[in-house]
Amino acid sequence: MSGPPRTPTALRLVKGNPSKRALNKAEPKPPSGVPPIPKHFNKQEKYWFKRIGEELDCSSVITKLDGMALELLIGAYVEWRKHRDVIDQVGETYNVTNMQGETLVKAHPQVAMMSDAWKRLRAMMSEFGMTPAARSKVSSEGKGEADPLEEFLKKRK
């Protein structure tokens, strides 16, 4: 299928529907809430899964079916953090002497691995609306805030 990926109905409702295409009324609505923490996670991964899961739940973004996507997000973050810690200790470059006796400066392999993890992390964060650019595409209306025009029109009826 060509073109951009389909936008979920819930996100189209929040963003607005400028094309006025019919919304999918039969779209599955999984129960909201944080999915269970995967059993194979280590202590650090469990911490981040719980913390980020709770933050996403507070903003009503995550459902019980999003466990695998959240697992990918946490995996990418923990991997990025691990590579960042190594680079902080050993530096981004190292010196190598070639056969002619010249010293070459090479990038540490962790830099490329960290870059790859960052690309995956950024993509997953965007999926959950966790970046400023992703949030700028969504308009959030406060719950319980009444529109003054709507209130006025209701009173007139």
Image (spheres, helix red, strand yellow):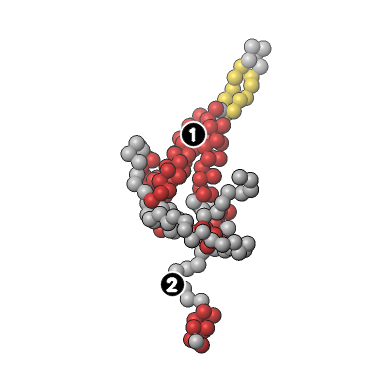
- Neighbour class for label 1 at 10 Å: few (<14), some, many (≥20)? some
Find residue 144 and name its label. Answer: 2
Quadrant of the image containing the N terminus: top right
Looking at the image, residue 122 lies above or below residue 15: above
- Neighbour class for label 2 at 10 Å: few (<14), some, many (≥20)? few
Find residue 83 and name its label. Answer: 1
**Residue kind at label 1, given as amino acid type:** His
Can the viewer see residue 68?
yes
Residue at image position (41%, 58%) is 58
Q: Position of residue 111 (x, y in %)?
A: 55, 32
**Left or right, 125 with reference to 29:** right
Q: Position of residue 45 (x, y in %)?
A: 38, 40
Residue at image position (56%, 51%) is 6
Q: Secondary structure at mark 2?
A: loop
Q: Position of residue 122 (x, y in %)?
A: 54, 44
Looking at the image, residue 24 lies above or below residue 51: below
Q: Position of residue 67 (x, y in %)?
A: 40, 46
**Is 93 or 77 nearer to us in this picture?**
77
